[in-house]
Amino acid sequence: MHLIAAITIALLTAAGIFLCLKRRTFDLVLGLTMLSYAANVLIFVMGRLLVNRAPIIDSRPLSLLNYTDPLPQALVLTAIVISFAMTALLVAMALKAYAQRGSDAIDGGDA
Amino acid sequence: MIAWALILPLGAGALLLLLERYSHSVQRVASALACIAGLMLALEILALADRGNVQVSLIGNWPAHVGIVLMLDRLSALMLVLTAILGVVSSIYAARGADREAPHFHALLQFQLLGLNGAFLTGDLFNLFVWFEVLLIASYGLLLHGATAERLQAGLKYVIFNLLASVLFLMGLGLLYGVVGSLNMADVAVKVTELLPQQQALALAAALLLMLVFAIKAALLPLFFWLPGTYGAAAAASAVLFAIMTKVGAYAIVRVFSLVFPDIAWVWVFPVGLLTLTLAAIGAMVAPSFARLAALWTIASAGTLLVGFALGTEDSTAAAINYLIASTLLGALLFLLLDAVRRVRIGGDLLDRGGAMALAKFLAPLLFIAMVAAAALPPSPTFLAKALLLSAAIDTAQTKLVWGVVLISSFLLLLALAHAYSQIVWRRNAGEPATDFSPVDLVMPLLLVVALAMLSIHADGVQRFTQRVAAQLHDPASTIEAVRSAPIKPRPEIAP
């Protein structure tokens, strides 16, 4: 399970960086989305991957053997919301720039 | 008390959104009043911080290593005051028309002040990320206002660059939490020293990722290419606040790396700071416009600042803080005057051609003072700060390097600024320029000039204060102790 998570993060990061190096804003938006997915999964994994453990305290004794760490889940929720809003803003700006210039290239040249 | 520095701009911002249905003058008065109240609050907080204890406020009454902590020391209080001064200048200067073309200008201004204050007060790394996003999203709105092609072009790059930085910030935070198990700065500082060697490496990688992010904000060497276009394109009222945005990056470096990994970080910052300063000074020599020149000067000042911090002695830190105060106010002044020059000169702010300039008898003296201060000539406060920095460098191993780079880059900047002044003011062509500018618009620049003059006149008081700030920064143990031992208030019993 850890290996799958690690490979997923690596692939998402690699694809994200590759897309970010392109000239068109469309590719860039996709790349940034993938990078932020990679960051989100990374934070989530950093709370350790455990199966069938809830972060909510019930009758079991208080120990990280019985519960998963709730903090990364709270952090990742914040991160998802923020990156979602930022991506939406970027898309709006990219559309406006495209409408003004008729080109999707970041520097305004031919794409 | 500390939390009011966040509640005030948040409340004012929300109120200003409601006031948008009324006339511009109502909004302007409300915004200016909120900013002035913020300045008075910041001064009060500075007096509180100057008593010497690190003030800690536990949000939600959670222990420091679990919840979010606000911490206030002399440096963060100083940054709050500088932010509040720029807030007042920006909100009043915007009344000359910038707030008409920009929807929600005053509300966004308050939200940006909120983000800045939060970034300066927080003692939690993830919370720092959140405040960075708050101030960035407000700054996107302020930068893009009017959405002209030029601003959209510069804004797109600015947003993309900062989004990338945010992702790196998150990855650094994730790694750090995975290894250390805490994101509270003081808690991390202690726990990092207790790690096993193989964990140390991962924690170090995470810390250097954070350093990279802060370096983007502070516009250090390979990462400053977004800045000149962005700052040049911004409207003056928003560019004023951008004068403190690079300082946020520098502040974050100082705040985090004076507590966590103090030995390793400065090894990187020192050469990068010197190179940034050199390259910015060379760039200033060939700047095609005053906007470019002012932006490159901002980058050079960020470089100087971090060289001072990286030298690592108490005197050099004090000199760097001295420079921070003067260069923040001066940066704001330069961007206000840039706006004035653009409005009254036929050639705009371009330096390769002459152009008739209206109102030269009002504008030229202010421009002259700003240029003298930017070139760090006496009697400006920047001169004093740089002299203190050079004298602090004598005690360190890198004396020759620092003296060489700082003096040569200062000389290059002096040449560039002198050239810019002579092109703008003296090289005139015939013709009467149309102008929508009146001497009243120079009140805010004049106020900043007075503030700079006060810094020079009260140089000994300022210097003693910066010594106290530096002494507190060089005593991280008491900061860590204050945060970790902050008492939790007893909770009222809740009936089951």
Image: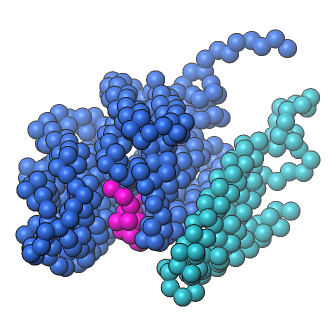
Chain colours: A cyan, B blue
> Left or right of A18: which side holds B442?
left
Quadrant housing the N terminus of chain A: bottom right
Report the magenta residues as a range. B217-236
Q: Quadrant of residue B64?
A: top right
Identified at 20% across, 37% down, the residue is B462
Give the image location of residue B141, x and y in percent.
50, 55
Residue B233 included in the magenta stretch of the image: yes
Which residue occupies the foreground of this view, B490 or B121?
B121
- If the image is split into quadrants, where does the C terminus of chain A sit? bottom right
For residue A70, side relative to residue B107 (left or right): right
- Residue B480 visible in this rendered orientation of the protein: no
Q: Is residue B465 visible?
A: yes
Pinpoint residue B412: horizontal percent, then vertical percent. 16, 71
How many numbered circles does the render carry?
A: 0
Q: Residue furthest bottom?
A: A110
Where residue B326 sits: x, y (%)? 23, 48
Residue at position x 65%, y 35% in the image:
B66
State the residue at coordinates (23%, 49%): B441
Q: Nearer the viewer, residue A27 or B131?
A: A27
Secondary structure of the magenta portion, mostly?
A: helix
Q: Quadrant of residue B488?
A: top right
Magenta stretch holds residue B73: no
Residue B238 shown left or right of residue B486 in the figure = left
Q: Using the image, determine if residue B382 lies above or below residue B272.
A: above
Q: Residue at x 48, y 64 (%)?
A: B147
